[in-house]
Image (cartoon, rainbow, N blue to C red):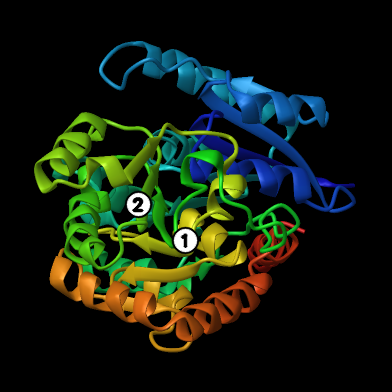
Amino acid sequence: MPVPVLLLARQLDYGGSERQLTVTALGLDRSLFEPHVGCFHPEGVFGGQLRAAGIPVAQFPVRSFRNQSVLAGALAMRKYIKENGIRLVHTFDVPLNVFGVPVAHTAGVHRVISSQRAQRSLTGRGMRTLLRATDRLVDGIVTNCEAVRQELIEQDGVRADKIHVCRNGIDTAKYTPSGRVRPDPLADASVVIGTVSVLRREKGLQTLLDAFASVSASDPRLRLVIVGSGPMRDELRQRAEALGIASRCWFEAATTQVATWLRGIDIFVLPSLHEALSNSLMEAMACGCCPVASNVGGNPELVRDGHNGLLFQKGDAGDLAAGLQLLLARQEVRLQYASAAAESITRYSIPAMVSRMQEIYRSLGVV
């Protein structure tokens, strides 16, 4: 009989953790596992995909950790676990690590595992204290890169044998270099530098604007595109105006057509100040962009400096500009890195990720 497993995230709309939960649930071998999904907010595109595939989606109605909805949600989750014979609970994000791990533990679930999919340095002190408490309750912790694994060992005191690395998987049939055509707003560009990112401060996008301003004088047809939405959108536009590059920058709101935009970008820049394993960077590499990334977190695990892209020091616009200038001056190097990047990312497919996750589940003795 397949083993019932419950995968948990706060919501089921667009987001990296939500996407990885969804592809895991959809990809699990149904002869071995019977996937269930639980969340606080079941609305969203991924919720629809899961229900369409016949995967049960349960709502545990927690509105805030500061009111009685926490108790109602905990009781609902315990009831669901008992009624469905759940043997494994796997939480995918910080809110469900904090909520779901202790609830599953007290419900007597056979195995409980959590996820750490971003660097904990981005988490507030109070929440980090709670996460450290869950570290002691779980049977395992899944990280998406070696950098986060090392952080948990060195800064949070987690035993190395408790941590399992399962790198993100992307849709390698959707994100490919074939059909590279510029979107209309970039049709007249000689070279397009770009990024796809949520527009938050830790993404370091000011560094990208400053570096572009430094190199843009060399070619009037050079263009910068920033695809994404977020709280810094207006501030970034104002910075582009102040730098005198606004007419050469295109800001595209968050879109489902990410692959189309990536195939119009020649040099993809990920200037993050903090990063784990970036889906955007992986997708850009798969689409044949030449990658340039800050030397933080999981970025060096994807980009090997001087082999399939370039790395630069985070927050250093001069260092980034120097790398961009090299790639603009030497097209053959840019194309070589782009080709090597596309080849290197083929091993990060969704089936490979699901296979690794199933291996982790089986190593914990649930099958």
Identify the residue position indicated by label 2 in the image. Answer: 224
Quarter of the view holding residue 356: bottom right
123 over 336 or under it: above or below: above
Q: Position of residue 222 (x, y in %)?
A: 35, 58
Residue toward you, 342 or 34: 342
State the quadrant of the C terminus. bottom right
**Label 1: which secondary element:** helix
Q: Nearer the viewer, residue 99 or 321?
A: 321
Residue occupying the point 47% across, 23% down:
74
- Give how far across and how far down residue 351 sits, in percent: 75, 61
Q: Earlier in the sequence, mark 2 or mark 1?
A: 2
Viewed as shown, does residue 230 lie left or right of 196? left
Can the viewer see residue 92?
A: no
Point out which mark residue 75 bears. none
Above or below residue 338? Residue 177 is: above
Residue located at (44% from left, 54% from top): 189
Residue type at numbered disc 1: Leu
Question: In x, y percent, where is residue 182?
Answer: 57, 50
Q: Residue at x 31, y 32 (%)?
A: 230
Q: Which residue is mark 1?
A: 281
Whether tag 2 and tag 1 are in contact, CB under 8 A, the answer is no
Answer few, some or many: residues within 10 Å of disc 1's Cα (few below 14, many 20 plus, some between 14 and 19): many
Q: Residue furthest bottom?
A: 306
Q: CA distance from mark 2 to mark 1?
A: 16 Å
**What amino acid type should be assigned to the residue bearing mark 2?**
Leu
Bin the neighbour count of mark 2 within 10 Å (Cα to Cα): few under 14, some 14-19, many 20 and up. many
